[in-house]
Amino acid sequence: MNLKALREQKHLTQEELSEASGISIRTIQRVEAGQLPKGHTAKALARALDIALDSLQNTDLTTENRDYSLIKIINLSSAFVTFIPLLNIILPLAIMHFRKQYNSLTKQIISLQILWTIVSALIFLLTGFLKISLSLSRHITLWVIIALILINLIVILVNAASIDRNKKLYFKLNFNFF
């Protein structure tokens, strides 16, 4: 349930919720538009609506604002820059931010790319070390990079197909980085 639905369930206008919570009307409008409330704002809204803070923070406030085609674009944007370190995180994060798609799916997409970047860097470093210590072919590093990029592309494409079919990610984490 989103903030607007919670507010309307209590028969409150934005102005009345603003007065009861001490939060500005503009902030309430931002939260109703999809911005996640944090800290003082979340506590004040939960208190004014007489609900548990956890229930306010654990609800996906942007469920009604989910644009699955935009979520798919956010996911696929990583594919176009997967071979450029960190840009596979920055580009989808920028799209998510500017299009205000703050929801569990977009957070998972970004978290997957963060984890993928960390793991890929570690594998790359390990390959360099093994190449030197085991006297492996000088082309092994190139093959590892190509394999890592292809695996990431497969994850991105499978998740895009899953968003189309099931409105959820096929590959997901049990945690978010943010």
Image (cartoon, grey):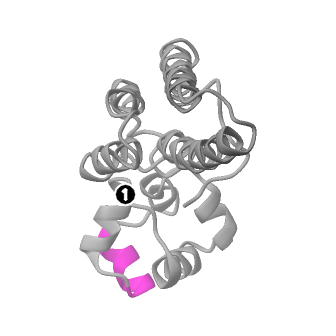
* Left or right, residue 101 beside residue 125: left
Determine the image quadrant of residue 71.
top left
Q: Position of residue 158 (x, y in %)?
A: 55, 17
Could you say which is closer to the camera, residue 90 or residue 140? 140
Could you say which is closer to the camera, residue 144 or residue 70? 144
Q: Position of residue 67 (x, y in %)?
A: 36, 31
Q: Main secondary structure of the magenta part?
A: helix
Q: Which residue is mark 1?
A: 32
Q: Is residue 168 visible?
A: no
The magenta stretch spans residue 11: no
* Residue at point 34%, 45% (across, down): 87
Range of the magenta residues?
Answer: 14-22
* Left or right, residue 51 beside residue 157: right
**What amino acid is found at the position of numbered circle 1 in the picture?**
Glu
Q: Going by the picture, which residue comes out furthest to the front?
A: 135
Q: Position of residue 68 (x, y in %)?
A: 41, 27
Q: Is residue 76 visible?
A: yes
Mark 1, residues whose alpha carbon is within 10 Å: few (<14), some, or many (≥20)? many
Could you say which is closer to the camera, residue 140 or residue 39? 140
Q: Indicate whether 73 appears above or below 122.
A: above
Q: Indicate whether 137 appears above or below 107.
A: above
* Left or right, residue 170 beside residue 76: right
* Left or right, residue 7 beside residue 158: left
Q: Position of residue 144 (x, y in %)?
A: 58, 28
Q: How many marks?
A: 1
* Residue at point 32%, 54% (across, down): 33
* Mark 1 residue element: helix
Determine the image quadrant of residue 84.
top left
